[in-house]
Image: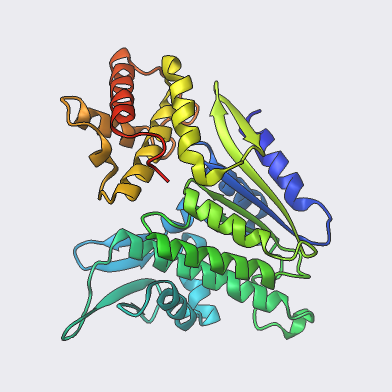
Amino acid sequence: MDLNGVIEKIKNDLDKNTNKINIDSIYAFNGTGKTRISRWFVDENDSRCLCFNSIFQDCFVWDNENYILYIDDYLEISKTIRDEGLDGRIIENFEYVYGKSVIPQFNDDFNQVTFNVKTKNGYDSDVKISKAEETLFVWSVYYSFVETAIEQLKIEVVEDRSTHIFDDLKYVIIDDPVSSVDDSIIVKIAILIKELIVQCNNLKVKFLITTHHILFFNSVNNLIKNIDSKIRKFKVYKLEIKNYEYVLSEDVKNLFGYHLYLKEKIQNEIDCIEKIHFNMFRVLLEKTANYCGYEKFGDCLYESDYKEEMIRLLNTYSHGDLFEFERTELTENEKEIFIKSFNDYNKKYKSEVVE
């Protein structure tokens, strides 16, 4: 199956006339097409789609010299915030997921944001926040958009709505909203998504949720499963690339033990290593580091003269479009470093350790 086939399958799922809230949830590694799937829905549906993905996030750009977060109005984000008066709601939603230790402040045109950080003596103004804090702020903007859209759609008489920019909303697409975010906050975001879904009862809104983060995937799925099945239709998938073909399967058993699946899969395919295996190994290392309390996944690798090169390869082949269907072969040296590093990992960590 090519990516178009995957998209067609997902779209058919979401568009089925079930008189319920149609929801698809997909677990996939970085680089297996998640962002391209979300981008297709945006390109083909325009005003009918509200999408959180890397494109939405890229509209928020740091000025590192002046500590200002600029909002590029490519998607008319600042215009929507201004016209719909959403700045207060965004700040409230940010406070909910993160607390009051960081206070965002919009300028008068709503295209710049500065942040004040709470200290013992009050607040430090104009501080650059962390990547996790930035992710949560951008999520709060998106969540506020969707929340407002649902509120407006619940007003049956169209003329009575305070805005009409969301009148045609059909798809809510959420692609990996938890990058660099702590586990406790990940669960909060999952709860917020469940609440959005419940609020869509009797509305013709469909949800597509994609992620490479196993805790988020399981948290969202378990919460959705607890929604009354009378109001929702729910499909769960795993998306992979095998031999340059996309595989969308419903084989998602025991996902909390997914590290065991990863370890077994790498072991079984150790003689035919491809770039996707670097992504798998990185996920395995990240889970191990989280369990052991290490700050970086590289701390789980053996000290060796090839450790730094392995970290570089894991970073290179685990993000973005670098290896999506790229047919350039791994070098023999890269394969050898991978095999050595994986065998070292197996010696150091037994499979039952990582939960």
What residue is at 22 percent from the left and 61 percent from the top?
A: 64
Which residue is at a point 22% across and 31% down the rendered structure image?
302
Q: Toward the viewer: 117 or 295?
A: 295
Left-right relation of 74 to 286 = right
Asked if residue 131 can be seen in this view, the reply is yes
In this picture, residue 153 sits left or right of residue 297: right
Q: Where is residue 61 in the image (x, y as percent from the top left)?
A: 34, 60
Count of numbered marks:
0
The image shows residue 100, relative to residue 348, as above or below, that is below
Whether residue 76 appears in this view of the structure is: no
Closer to the camera in the image, 107 or 191: 191
The answer to which quarter of the image holds residue 221 is bottom right
Instruction: Locate the N terminus and report the quarter of the image it occupies.
Output: top right
Q: Nearer the viewer, residue 242 or 147?
A: 242
Check the image and report above or below for 150 versus 355. below
Query: Residue 202: which quarter of the image?
Result: bottom right
Q: Where is residue 135 in the image (x, y as percent from the top left)?
A: 39, 61
What percent of the width, then of the height, locates residue 288?
35, 43
Q: Position of residue 275 (x, y in %)?
A: 41, 26
Task: Specify whether 339 is left or right of 305.
Answer: right
Residue sitting at 60 percent across and 57 percent down? Answer: 222
Q: Which residue is drawn at 74% across and 85% down?
A: 160
Colour scheme of the rendered structure: rainbow
